[in-house]
Image: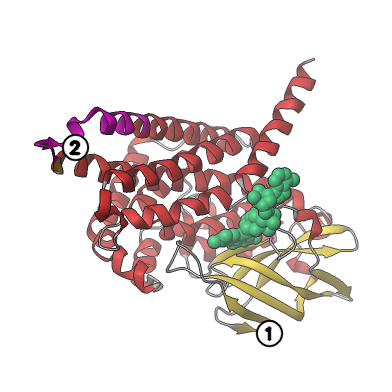
Amino acid sequence: MPTDPDVRAELVATVRRFVEREVAPVALELEHADEYPAALVEQMRELGLFGVTIPEEYGGLGLDLLTYVAVVEELSAGWMSLSGVVNTHLITAHLLRHHGTEEQRRRWLPRLAAGELRGCLSLSESDAGSDTRNIACRAERDGDEYVITGTKMWVTNGERAGLVSLAARTDEGITCFMVEKEPGPRSGAITVSRNIGKLGYKGIETVEMVYDGHRVGADAVLGGEEGLGRGLGFVLSALETGRINIAARAVGVARAAFEAAIRYARQRRTFGRPIAEHQAIQAKLADMATRLEASRLLTERAAVLKDTGQRCDVEAGMAKLFASETAFEVATEAMRIHGGVGYTTELPVERYYRDAPLMLIGEGTNEIQRLVIARGLLARYRDDA
Ligand SMILES: Cc1cc2nc3c(=O)[nH]c(=O)nc-3n(C[C@H](O)[C@H](O)[C@H](O)COP(=O)(O)OP(=O)(O)OC[C@H]3O[C@@H](n4cnc5c(N)ncnc54)[C@H](O)[C@@H]3O)c2cc1C
């Protein structure tokens, strides 16, 4: 059900206030220190953001994806890392909601919605990023249990999460497991073996995790016995919301970069007038704003479509592709408009420039998005024939 526009507007205004009052004053410092924003995350929990798209019957706010993308845009305009705290958490909730058994939904969704339990997604491995079918992590059946062995890479929120949506190989094919663990560097036979250093996207962890014969009950198989071998399909479908999240983040970063650029262009003077009066700068501002607006519309359209329950690889892919390329370009142009000060660590412009490339890569690179979009279009045109 679409969210009442007044409810949506109220939540977005609340998040915007939170970003202005709480995030903006500390983002620069926390980011440069690469420090986990524990106090901000706690406030996000109090605002209900860990349950924003989880249905009310499971304790969430039950809001639609259009509301979610607006919230993600606000968070990312303040500090993109904050949107990463909720992204794979809500992908995990999405997996449970659409592919879990009722028992699994009741067991985990209320705690995820309350933010007591934090979710993460563990699909990628060092040799299985774009090539997801190459997953080597194995889960062997042993009576009523599965024994998981393998090394997963790039697990954002992996250390602090208490529930991992894990893709592992079983006799039936790739299966998605819901692995409950203690937050921290070690839990059972799971070890966080490395915290990966990053260009941007600082403050929240992206880690390597080793499973050395970790045991889970058979009830951890997402969707029960029927879910065996269907995990990759489940995860790829949930990744559409991940791509919509990435598109919304990109819109937030592009908006922040554009707003910084236009403010600076009005105030900085060269050759006796504000640089905003030079036509070369005006052309940049016009292109930046146009692409930003188009990115937001594509993102909203993908969110509306996904809310209807349809697969929307093409629309989610288009939004992610266009918005992320836009964020990258707008961040670069914002830096150029700032001249020398844009290159310093005193202003957030250099952060937008470091954060933007993640959106080109995360949730499937843009090279892969183009393949996904083209395949989807070719199938649609074949079906039309
Ligand atoms: C900061 C960060 C956080 C992440 N968080 C998570 C997470 O929480 N959970 C998770 O599971 N994963 C996560 N990832 C992993 C991410 O999804 C992968 O890095 C991404 O899918 C790319 O995979 P790869 O790194 O193996 O690159 P590769 O697949 O090795 O690609 C290398 C290059 O080859 C290109 N390429 C590959 N195949 C093709 C092809 N068929 N045609 C054309 N070009 C191709 C790619 O586009 C890219 O340019 C994260 C990554 C980063 C950087």
Can residue 247 be seen in the rendering of this structure? yes
- Residue 295 vs residue 278, the one in the foreground: 278
Instruction: Name the quadrant containing residue 145.
Output: bottom right
**In the depicted structure, whether residue 331 falls above or below residue 355:** above
Spot occupied by residue 350 in the image (x, y as percentages of width and height): 35, 56
> What residue would you read off at disc 2?
275
**In the depicted structure, whether residue 188 falls above or below residue 267:** below
- The label nearer to you, 1 versus 2, is 2
| Relative side of 25 to 356, left or right | left
Q: How many marks?
A: 2
Spot occupied by residue 272 in the image (x, y as percentages of width and height): 8, 36
Secondary structure mainly formed by the magenta segment: helix
User: Quadrant where the C terminus lies?
Assistant: top right
| Relative side of 173 to 96, left or right | right
Residue situated furthest front in the rendering? 271
Q: Where in the image, quadrant-wise, is ligand 1 located?
A: bottom right
Whether the residue under disc 2 has CB within 8 Å of ligand 1: no
| Circle 2: residue type | Ile
| Relative side of 46 to 299, left or right | left
**In the depicted structure, whether residue 351 falls above or below residue 185:** above
| Circle 1: residue type | Gly
> What residue would you read off at disc 1?
188
Residue at image location 75% in from the left, 63% down from the top: 127
Spot occupied by residue 315 in the image (x, y as percentages of width and height): 59, 33
32 part of magenta stretch = no
Instruction: Name the quadrant containing residue 321.
Output: top right
